[in-house]
Amino acid sequence: MSHTVGVRQARKQRTRQALLDAALGLLEEQSLSSLGLREVTRTVGIAPTAFYRHFHDLGELGVALVEEALGSLHAMVRTVLIEQAGVEAQIESAVAVVDRHVREYPAHVRFVARERHGGVRAVRQAIAGQLDRFGAEVAEALATQPAAQGWTARDLRMLADLFVDRLVTTAAAILDTEDADDAEAARARVVEAARWQIRLITIGQQHWKGEAGEG
Amino acid sequence: MSHTVGVRQARKQRTRQALLDAALGLLEEQSLSSLGLREVTRTVGIAPTAFYRHFHDLGELGVALVEEALGSLHAMVRTVLIEQAGVEAQIESAVAVVDRHVREYPAHVRFVARERHGGVRAVRQAIAGQLDRFGAEVAEALATQPAAQGWTARDLRMLADLFVDRLVTTAAAILDTEDADDAEAARARVVEAARWQIRLITIGQQHWKGEAGEG
DNA sequence: CGATTCGGAGGACAGTTGTTCACTCACTTC
DNA sequence: GAAGTGAGTGAACAACTGTCCTCCGAATCG
């Protein structure tokens, strides 16, 4: 009973992961719609036909990559918005989480930024779906905060989307600093600008009702 | 002296434009790094080798497309921020300009959104350069407004970038509504959300000094 | 008018692509 | 331990790619 999972199935999942890893590596310098099936299998070291044992399509592989890249996103909402107390601490934490995530998984972030509006419909929809769920979760978390009492669900959602878009844009902007003159300094500037911008949005949130009470 | 421009040069520029148009059309359903040179010349109706008379590379064609797509951007700053008086009118005007621009040039907008983080470095840099100039111009325009008196150039630039990013994101989001169930309604929701979000940012701007006076 | 320039045509080149088919052979199952 | 499953192989297919070279013919120039 030492192999309840099955040697075969384990080996299959290992080459499946190898395909995902190889594709992610190749996608650092091209986009999914130009990636070749043979290109991927060649870098893994298997025959081209073996690819079909795992995916019908390169698009299907792309969707799997989206899951891998954005699946861990949801745990972050809790980390930032629930475990932290105080607006300033939340801003600091949110930006820090993004910064750290880009440093740890640059290829995943690049993939999402590139394919969010890329040429493969299925992948675009997968990313849009994940970000939509993410926005909903942030809105839900915001609703529990004292600063958002009395807000409609719709307003909370628009605010959440504003935060999410800003974090996604920030992640992409951090990546772009990699080939700058002084990469680390440029990165610090982007992160600082993101903190400033989110703080400004928060101030807008706090004064919303007083300024533009909705009819 | 009726042909000072030259029949030859005019014909050349006409096929050059045909190449750009054909490429833009093909790029609606794929990304630049997967676009084929022969694919483009085939839809134009010329021999593959004729391509080299106009561009060394498909990347070079891409850079030309960036110029075509984003070159008209700078005139918009004046339209929105100078010709309009009053914050509310400016917000309305900015969002309306984006909405109209996406409706008139959807392929150009899609191209920019797709290639902003796409697989061709030269095109990425061209887009980044244009958006950078755009941000600088918005910051400059903001500086003339009474609401921004006493702000540092750095703060104005971060605020401008926040506006620019929001408008770019909105343009891309509008495009995504094209294949929704009720496209026109979804589009209206996106536009309304953008207005709401920009209004909130503006409120943050107005209360910035009072809340977080910098040392 | 003659000479020259140059946008475009057409053929040919070696490589690459996705997909098919029949196959092997280690693992699983009974 | 025999039968069956299924991940991976390897050859072959037609279709396609970017680029090179030579050539044509109309627009330009002196």
Image (cartoon, coloured by chain):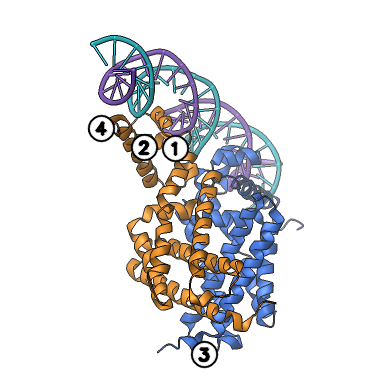
Chain colours: A orange, B blue, C purple, D cyan
In the image, residue B101 sits, relative to residue A71, either above or below, namely: below
Q: Element under label 3? A: loop
User: How far apart are the two marked residues, 4 and 2, measured between alpha carbons?
Assistant: 19 Å
Chain letter belonging to callout 3: B
Tell whether label 2 touches label 4 (CB within 8 Å).
Answer: no
At 58% from the left edge and 54% from the top edge, which residue is drawn?
B111
**Between marks 4 and 2 in the image, the one whose residue lies nearer the viewer:** 4
Q: Nearer the viewer, residue B98 or B15?
A: B98
Q: Which residue is mark 4?
A: A3
Q: Tag 1: residue type?
A: Gly
Q: Secondary structure at mark 2?
A: helix
Which comes sooner in the sequence, label 1 or label 4?
4
Mark 2–mark 3 contact, CB under 8 Å?
A: no
The Cα–Cα distance between marks 2 and 1, rounded to whole angstroms, is 16 Å
Q: Is residue A170 left or right of residue B64?
A: left
| Disc 4 and disc 3 in contact, CB within 8 angstroms | no
Residue A176 lies in quadrant:
bottom left
The amino acid type of the residue labelled 2 equals Arg
Q: CA distance from mark 1 to mark 4?
A: 35 Å
User: What chain is tagged by disc 4?
Assistant: A
Which of the two discs, 4 and 2, labels the residue nearer the N terminus?
4
Does residue C27 appear to the left or right of B25 in the view shown? Answer: left
Marking on residue B150: 3
Give the residue type at disc 4: His
Q: How many marks?
A: 4
Rounded to the nearest angstrom, the CA distance separating label 2 from label 3 is 58 Å
- Tell me the tag on residue B156: none
- Residue pictured at 41% horizontal, 78% vertical: A88
| Secondary structure under the numbered disc 4 in the rendered image | loop
Q: Residues within 10 Å of mark 4 (few under 14, many from 20)?
A: few
Residue B165 sits in quarter: bottom right
Q: Do badges 2 and 3 share one subunit?
A: no
